[in-house]
Amino acid sequence: MRIEPHTAPLQLGAAALICALTAAWTPQGQARIPQDRGQAGEVVTISQFSDLRPTDWAYQALQSLLERYGCVSGTGVSTFNGTGSITRFEAAALLNSCMGRIGETTDVLKALSQELAKELAILRGRTDGLEARVGELEATRFSPTTRMNMLTRSALGAVQYGGNQINSASNTWGQGTGSLPLRNAFTFNYDIMMFVDTSTTGKDLLRTILRMANFGSSAFGIAGGNNPAPLTQLDEGFEDPNGPNIVGINRLFYRTPINRYLSVAVGPRIRQNDALAVWPTIYARPGSELLLKIFTQAGSTSAYSLLIGPGGGLMLKDSTKTTGWSAGVNYIATNGEKGNAALGGMGTAGSAATAMAQLSYTGKRWNLSLAAAQNGAGVRQDGTSYWRTLQPQLSSSVTNNGSTQTLSIAGYWQPLNTGLIPTVSAGFGYNQANLNNSPVSVNQQQLQNLKSAGWMTGFTWDNAFQKGNQIGFALGQPTFVTAVNGQAANDGNYVFELYYKIQATNALSVTPTLFYLSRPRGEETVAPGIPSTASPSFDALGALVELTFKI
């Protein structure tokens, strides 16, 4: 008797999600304010403190201090429950916790100190007895200008594949040559990121991220190039190119303001979102406790490719305001560290580089962002298997196999208060790829041009069923080919995910999740060795529980 390995974990995951959704609802609270930078690993942000209104100038000032220095007051206000207002005493406690981390007296610090002078005096009177102990702790710090945080994410679950392109006897998509093994075993994987942040002026940031994970050969990773449905990759579905359980430098970059309006970010290992003034969606910010990777790219996997490599960017944004216009440009080359111009370098045919420009306007509870990008051959642009096969590639036999031009529009809207009305995020991307000397033929014609598109929309309900918890639902079409050499393509597909995030403690969240992909391979659904059928099908249904620790 053959036992199917995927049925039990799916039932467990579904049961966990259903149980979570049957708790009591507490809709009170304010809508969560997103973080513009979209950087990973920020353990503490002002949006995590319950009652300080975003319209107050002190909210904006404290937001800047908290995000830069990771301050925690110890007063109990650090609850991951969205937003609202905090008392003046709580604000003073937060300010006091930041003062020991700041190496200089800034205008913002002076203004906040004057505003909260009475509360600070009372607070400091209560804490005089702790000064000796604090001094001991300060002496053991790695550096007065350096702090370390850790983000640990684990996923426990499985994926079930369905459709008439599966060979059950061999547990593969297809049969014989060209078939791919189904990754339908129940797995438990992890991803650890260590953030080392240093500031020399109190305004700049030197960030080093060390990362280790073992997702590569699971259904939630893509190592080996033989995942039959790569779109099931999770945001944490990472593995070092040298293998599982290996520590490597994932990112290394420096970001600093030039003046009130202009900032620069540059580094030998910088990711695209590190060099953006604004991240255009709330539903998924890169590097946070996210789920399917496809929903972290603002509906356009070509514009927001999240490429990592040598490069940098310029960002134009009024640093004293949380609303208004912003703009930026960035350039990142996957192979920018290689000295052979035929294989890499900066600005060469082998760079595998992306160049992007973004224009954005952020209101009090909304954002609208436009982006244009050009991706060279070899840049990974996620989507259906058919799109990934045909998009411009780098190979030893072709010097330049083309490029992809992209236009994107994305944004979000937040209700004034949390409740039944969700926060809405959405994004759309349109791509055109022109290929030179492509060795690929489609319908007996040399591949010369491609058109593709993709979109997503995501909904989040903060403080759902219990203060601090969140429901999320996203639906979209990962990038799919719409035309090849001017002829329509049949590459359409749909994907959705549904999760309930339970904030167990300030540092721990538990997130049961379901997701479904209707046609992850698109026009490549037809598998080798399988008898032809009028309606070939191949889909993927996933269930998992994600555990996230922020330390």
Image (tube, grey):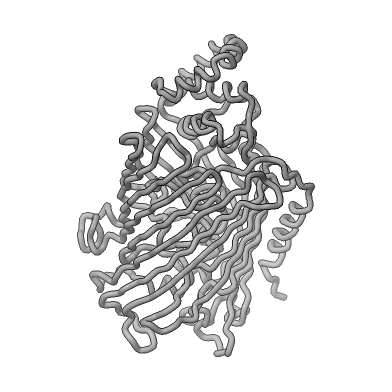
What residue is at 60 percent from the left and 45 percent from the top?
A: 548
Left or right position of 396 against 116: left
Q: Position of residue 15 (x, y in %)?
A: 75, 58
Residue 266 in the figure: left or right of residue 173: left
Quadrant of the drawing holding the N terminus? bottom right
Q: Is residue 19 above or below residue 130?
A: below
Looking at the image, can residue 415 be seen?
yes
Of residue 263 and residue 219, the one placed in the foreground of this image is 263
The residue shown at (53%, 20%) is 115
Say above or below: 213 vs 112. Answer: below
**Residue 131 position (above or below residue 342):** above
Q: Nearer the viewer, residue 379 or 119?
A: 119
Vertical side of 125 occupied by 429: above or below: below
The residue that appears at 67% across and 41% down in the rendered structure is: 468
Residue 144 visible (yes or no): no
Q: How far across and down, in percent of the image, does residue 324 sit? A: 44, 44
User: Would residue 239 appear left or right of 531 to someone viewing this image?
Assistant: left
On screen, residue 437 versus residue 323, left or right, reads left
Q: Position of residue 198 (x, y in %)?
A: 39, 32
Frontmost residue, 188 versus 427:
427
